[in-house]
Amino acid sequence: MKVAASILDCDFLHLSVELEAVTEAGADAIHLDVMDGHFVPNLSFGVPLARAVRRAVTVPVHSHLMVSEPEWLIERFLPYSDLIIFHIEAAEMPAQCLETIHSAGKAAGISLNPNTPVESLRPLVAEVQDVLVMSVYPGFGGQEFSPESPGRIREVARLIKETGSNATISVDGGLNPRNCAIVAAAGAQVAVSGSAIFHSPDYAAAIKALRCSTP
């Protein structure tokens, strides 16, 4: 299991120190939760922070656009991201989103909320590099993991196999070492975690504990 550290819960007053610490602790990627106050009921950060993170780290940067009409923001984040993830519920032209991302030579991901049918991904899943399964409703950190998530991960894994997609499966929301093992067993390959890492006194130990592969 790879671990992408969501910096939503880090100490922004010491961002460069936090980024250095979490990457040295073994994070495989930095995950940026970009929120617009419309698609989700919270605001987070924008392009200037993505630019700063890209300059500070050498690991991949994943920009998770929890925004309405991501078509209009993707190009702004592309220079600072290795993977751009947008929500299937928010995109009016998802195929255009994928084309824009791929034309820039970047990886594309699609995320879906806990109440969105997995089948809605079928027309697009063969063209994406990652499917991000939300195990909470997006917008706030520190939420409880949804117990329905492992079943949804298995459903996504079946869809990926049926369509011949090479997409990985990421999971975001309320992850800890115990439920991380469960989602790994269901077929997930990447754990996105914020509070479990940044609220821990030992980032390396927290990341190591999340790298579980069996329940």
Image (cartoon, rainbow, N blue to C red):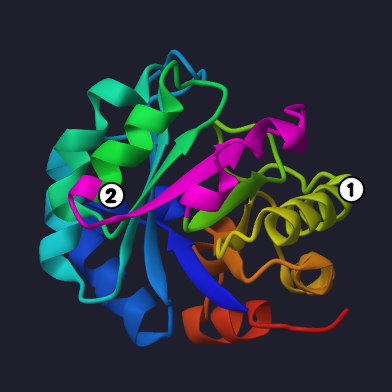
Question: Which residue is at a point 47% across and 58% down the rendered structure image?
Answer: 129
User: Please, what secondary structure does the residue beneath circle 1 have?
Assistant: loop
Assign the C terminus to one quadrant of the image. bottom right
Judge whether residue 46 can be spotted in this image. Answer: no
Instruction: Report how far apart the C-alphas of labels 2 and 1 lie in the structure.
Output: 34 Å
Give the magenta-colored segment's residue range: 103-128
Q: In this view, does 120 lie to the left or right of 206?
A: right
Query: Residue 186: x percent and y percent?
Result: 83, 66
Q: In this view, does 38 lie to the left or right of 126?
A: left
Q: What residue type is labelled 1?
A: Pro
Percent coordinates x, y for residue 84 in the rendering: 35, 47
Residue holding disc 1: 147
Q: Residue at x 23, y 52 (%)?
A: 13
Q: What element carries label 2?
A: helix
| Label 2, residues with CA under 10 Å away: few <14, some 14-19, many ≥20 | some
> Of 177 and 82, which appears nearest the observer?
82
Q: Which amino acid does label 2 sit on?
A: His
Q: Is residue 36 left or right of residue 150?
A: left
Residue at numbered disc 2 = 102
Observer able to see residue 66 = yes
- Say which label, 2 or 1, has the lower sequence index: 2
Closer-to-camera residue (35/74): 74
Q: How crowded is mark 1: few (under 14 residues within 10 Å), some or many (20 or more)?
A: few
